Amino acid sequence: MGKENLAIRVVRSDGVSFEYEADDYKGWHITSLEGLDFPNLEIFTEDRGFGNGSIITGKRKEARDINIKARCSFTSRAERERVVGFHNNNYTFDLYINYMGINRIAKGCELKSCKCPTENIYKPLNITVGYLHPESDLLSNESVAVGFYDVDPFWHVTRVYTNGGSLPFGIISQSLSKTIYYTGSEDTYVHAQVEMLGLTPNINIVVNGKILKINYTFKEGDILVIDSELKYVKINNQDLSPNYYNGEILPELIITFGDNEISFYDDNHDNSSFNTTVSYNGRYGGL
């Protein structure tokens, strides 16, 4: 694995980072990497009362064991102290992985094991590190944001100016719904921000037929934030009382592989009184 194809940067929960292999050479090279392809799969069964075979009662993806072996091209007291000081399981760790140009994140990992042999002070440093990733999925390293507006072109005319150029003519309008094509292998959650441009009587958020209805009259300047992963609804950064919305629907606002229909509108089936942005992080079963 050449360094142009592999880079792993680990960020500790206090902000300190360590690179086992970097795009720009920093002395460390990964010699072995395990646990990023697929998580372990578990299927639960029970014997049939009659006949052969089993009944499938459930299935799950297990947490990931991510194991890294790396070798430093030099040895020094300072580098050994850095290795020992960084790998401290009082913290949690986020792993930022670039593998053949594919970028993924393993968030909230626990340090499970670490070895940096002391057998020969003249040998280059070697480390073997094991992380436990509590989730089975890896995240994309960037969120995707989708704005709910359309540009309807009118005409385009070229005019003569001192610096040249042309004038495009069109109109920007809000769209009631958007189709999002999602390529992640695992379902992911919706994060939405709605900025009120005027008085708005209630808002309906529809994701693949699931309707979250917020019975609240918004005023100009209010900012509504919905997060189906963290399961909250906030107005101006304050939690909205669950009495105002059907909270049981909130965790069902998810995006699945393929086309996903998402809509935002008020009780008048209109959305001209607010601006909407939806964002999500791709989730993947492996590299």
Image (cartoon, rainbow, N blue to C red):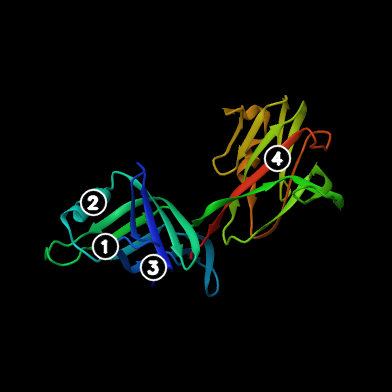
Q: Residue at x 76, y 27 (%)?
A: 198
Residue 204, labelled with which disc?
none
* Circle 3 residue: 3
Residue 41 left/right relative to 214:
left
Q: CB of mark 4 within 8 Å of CB of mark 1?
A: no
**Kind of residue at badge 1:** Thr
Mark 4 or 1, nearer chain start: 1
Which of the 4 quarters of the picture holds residue 242? Answer: top right
Q: Residue at x 28, y 48 (%)?
A: 89
- Secondary element under disc 4, as helix, strand or loop, is strand
Position of 225 relative to 1 (above/below): above
The residue most toward the front is: 162
Spatial distance from mark 4 to mark 2, Cα to Cα? 46 Å
* Mark 4 Cα shell of 10 Å, populated few (<14), some (14-19), many (≥20): many
Spatial distance from mark 4 to mark 1, Cα to Cα? 47 Å
Position of 83 relative to 267 (above/below): below
* Circle 1 residue: 128
* Circle 4 residue: 276
**Kind of residue at badge 2:** Arg
Which of the two marks, 4 or 2, is nearer to us in this view?
Answer: 2
Position of 166 relative to 72 (above/below): above
Q: CB of mark 1 within 8 Å of CB of mark 2?
A: no
**Kind of residue at badge 4:** Thr
Q: CB of mark 4 within 8 Å of CB of mark 3?
A: no
**Kind of residue at badge 3:** Lys
* Circle 2 residue: 82
Which of the 4 quarters of the picture holds residue 83? Answer: bottom left
* Mark 3 Cα shell of 10 Å, populated few (<14), some (14-19), many (≥20): some
Q: Residue 97, position in %: x, y?
A: 43, 59
Mark 1 or 3, nearer chain start: 3
Mark 4 or 3, nearer chain start: 3
Q: Residue at x 60, y 49 (%)?
A: 280
